[in-house]
Image (tube, rainbow, N blue to C red):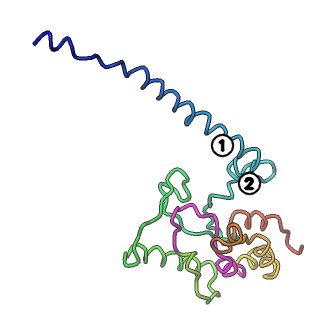
Amino acid sequence: MGAAANNVPRQPGLLRPALTIFVGLAVVTGLLYPGAVTGIARAVFPHEAAGSLIEKDGKVVGSALIGQPFSEPKYFWGRLSATAPMPYNAAASVGSNLGPSNPALTDAARARIEALQAADPDNKAPVPVDLVTASGSGLDPHISPAAARYQAARVARLRGLSVAQVEALIAANTEGPGLAVFGEPGVNVLKLNLALDGVKRGA
C-alpha cells in the first residue's frame, strides 16, 4: 500500500502560474486598458470625457448629461425624477418602475399637473406627458420641444420677454436625435435656462 502511494506522480505547483495570470490580467484590464481608453477619450472628446460640464462665469454649474430640479415659474421645468434622497441624484440613478395602473404614478402626475396649472392658470393646453412622468434613469436633462413650448408663455410673461424671444431660445437649444437618427429631438433644460438668464428685458 505504501509502495503504491509512493509511485503516484506529483502534480506540479499551480499557485505560481495562477498568481502570474491573475496579476497579468489585473494589470491589463485594470490599468492598461482603462488608461488607454481614457487617454484616447480625452484626446478625441475632451469635453465629453470630462463629464460634459457646463460653466457659467468660470464656475461649473452642472453637466449637460444630468438634469437639475427647477421649480421657480420663471424657469423652464424639466422631467420628474425618481431618484432618492434628492431628485437627479447621479449616485442613485433609477426609474420609478411604477406601472400604469399604480395609483402612485397617477398621484405624481396629478401633482405635477396641478403645479404647472398653478404657475400658469391661463394655459389651457394639454400638458405634454414628459412633464408629468419620470425618465428611466431619473437623470434625463432633456424635455421635448413640445414640453418647452408649453411653458414658453409663462416664462416670457414672468421675464418680461416676448413669446417669440423665448421660442427662439427654445429653437436654439433644441438638439437633434443622436447621430441624426436615434431618438427624438430634445431641449436641454439647464442650457435653456442659462441662455434665458443671459437675456435682458427689452433686448
Q: Quadrant of residue 6?
A: top left
What amino acid is found at the position of numbered circle 1 in the picture?
A: Val
For the N terminus, the quadrant is: top left
Q: Write down the region rendered in magenta.
A: 133-153
Q: Residue beneath label 1, please?
A: 37
Q: Is residue 128 above or below residue 51?
A: below
Q: How far across and how far down the image is residue 75, in percent?
A: 69, 69
For the C terminus, the quadrant is: bottom right
Q: Residue furthest left?
A: 1
What amino acid is found at the position of numbered circle 2 in the picture?
A: Ile
Q: Earlier in the sequence, mark 2 or mark 1?
A: 1
Q: Nearer the viewer, residue 154 or 58?
A: 58
Q: How far across and how far down the image is residue 190, in percent?
A: 69, 63
Q: Residue at x 62, y 89 (%)?
A: 125
Q: Is residue 82 above or below residue 161?
A: above
Q: Is residue 25 left or right of residue 12?
A: right
Q: Quadrant of residue 164?
A: bottom right
